[in-house]
Amino acid sequence: QVQLVESGGGSVQAGGSLRLSCAASRNIHSTYDMAWFRQAPGKEREGVAAIGRDGIINYADSVKGRFTISQDNSKNTLYLQMNSLKPEDTAIYYCAARPGMTYVPLAPRMYNFWGQGTQVTVSS
């Protein structure tokens, strides 16, 4: 079992930046794929970025060039640096994990463990 706890959400104006963190209950980054998802009101949960146990990274087209996923294995923590934020980035952001495989999908159904989410609000 893996527990994940997100932090770092908040309210910013368009063009601003936030960094989300996801602390894992144990060291899983060398064996698990990790990902960030988001869900806006009335919309389905969507993948934002994923990083595989071997370092392969996958981004949603909507965030490429603006968001950066990274991890610090010594701290058991996953990060999402979000720059040039837009109002359409407003959502609850979740981190997720699954035992590592050979690819890093952005489909929510492919992940087993989830955090409770952190709210990100971007005003125009």
Image: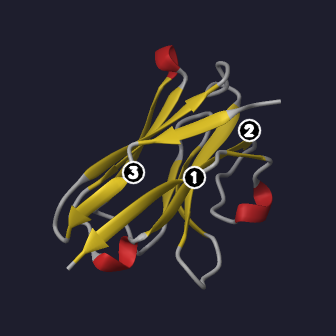
Residue on which the image places disc 2: 100
What numbered label is drawn on residue 9? 3
At 64% from the left and 52% from the top, the residue drawn is 104
* Colour approach in the figure: secondary structure
Label 3: how many Cα within 10 Å (few below 14, some 14–19, many 20+): some
Q: CA distance from mark 1 to mark 2?
A: 22 Å
3 or 2: tag closer to the N-terminus: 3
Q: Residue farthest to the bottom? A: 42
* Quadrant of the frame with the C terminus: bottom left
Q: Is residue 93 left or right of residue 31?
A: left
At 69% from the left and 66% from the top, the residue drawn is 107
At 64% from the left and 48% from the top, the residue drawn is 116
Task: Determine whether label 3 and label 2 are within 8 Å by CB.
Answer: no
Task: Determine whether label 3 and label 1 are within 8 Å by CB.
Answer: no
Residue type at numbered disc 2: Gly
Between 124 and 70, which is closer to the camera in this rendering? 124
1 or 2: tag closer to the N-terminus: 2
Q: CA distance from mark 3 to mark 1?
A: 9 Å
User: Where in the figure is residue 106, as x and y percent of width and height?
Assistant: 63, 63
3 or 1: tag closer to the N-terminus: 3
Measured along the vertical axis of the image, is residue 93 above or below residue 45?
A: above
* Quadrant of the frame with the N terminus: top right
Q: Is residue 23 left or right of residue 16?
A: right
